[in-house]
Image (spheres, rainbow, N blue to C red):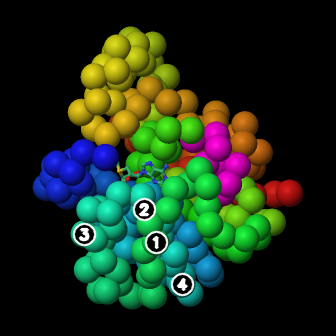
Amino acid sequence: MGKWFSKLYDPVMEPLERLKFRYIRETLIHKAKGNVLEIGSGTGLNFPYYTQAVKVTAIEPDPTMRKKSLKRAEHARVPIDVILADAQALPFPEHTFDTVVGTLVLCTIPNPEKALNEIRRVCKPGGHVLFFEHVRAEHSLLGRLQDWMTPVWKRVCNGCHLNRETLETVKKAGFTIVHVEKHNNGILLMIEALNEK
Ligand SMILES: C[S@@+](CC[C@H](N)C(=O)[O-])C[C@H]1O[C@@H](n2cnc3c(N)ncnc32)[C@H](O)[C@@H]1O
């Protein structure tokens, strides 16, 4: 992982956070209940918004990002542990979590299908998944622009793909979609789904 990316993540994100992301994070994260898993928690930008969780276990494979998140974990309203781990091979037994959260992460994980299968395994039957993701636009011209930009974008932004069709991938993994909220011409999605087994 590029160290510069981890170090510059918070300042680079700040304008977007102010404009829209903070509102989305707050709305989504507030819904996380019970024993919660957050995948790819980065610098912990979601941590201030957990209000209903009993406990949060966050996993993050980048040591620099994990380290940055520890201060936010300390100041959170609920207990948060941050573990170095990969969402494609989660180190937890099946049916452990009531809610699984992921924000701006399925765009970056090398094999999102594998990660979603792991999430399905560790999430309790009837448990909730909450995602906030940027996706490929439905608008064909914008979608093609995202396709065109992705090879370079991926290199600069630590593997982030601009053109993944994440809602479809979540459905294909077997989750039942409960609610989708679209922002910015459908490029940003808030997804709530159930792990019905
Ligand atoms: C764009 S950042 C988003 C960070 C944070 N979730 C947020 O909303 O600000 C993408 C995150 O995905 C993490 N990531 C990349 N590959 C991963 C994997 N295989 N498993 C879990 N997290 C991963 C990165 O380390 C990084 O923290």
Q: Nearer the viewer, mark 4 or mark 1?
A: 1
Q: Is mark 2 within 8 Å of ligand 1?
A: yes
**Residue 19: in sight, yes or no?**
no
- Which residue is depicted at the point 54% across and 84% down? 55
Residue 83 bears which disc, if any?
A: 1
Q: Nearer the viewer, mark 3 or mark 4?
A: 3
Could you tell me if the residues under marks 3 and 4 are in contact, i.e. CB atoms within 8 Å? no
Magenta-tinted stretch? 112-119
Answer with mark 1 or mark 3, whichever residue precedes in sequence: 3
Secondary structure state at the residue bearing disc 3? helix
**What's the amino acid at mark 1?**
Ile
Secondary structure state at the residue bearing disc 2? loop
Could you tell me if the residues under marks 4 and 1 are in contact, i.e. CB atoms within 8 Å? no
Task: Please tell me whether residue 118 belongs to the stretch shown in magenta.
Answer: yes
Residue 172, image x, y percentages: 72, 37
Task: Please tell me whether residue 25 belongs to the stretch shown in magenta.
Answer: no
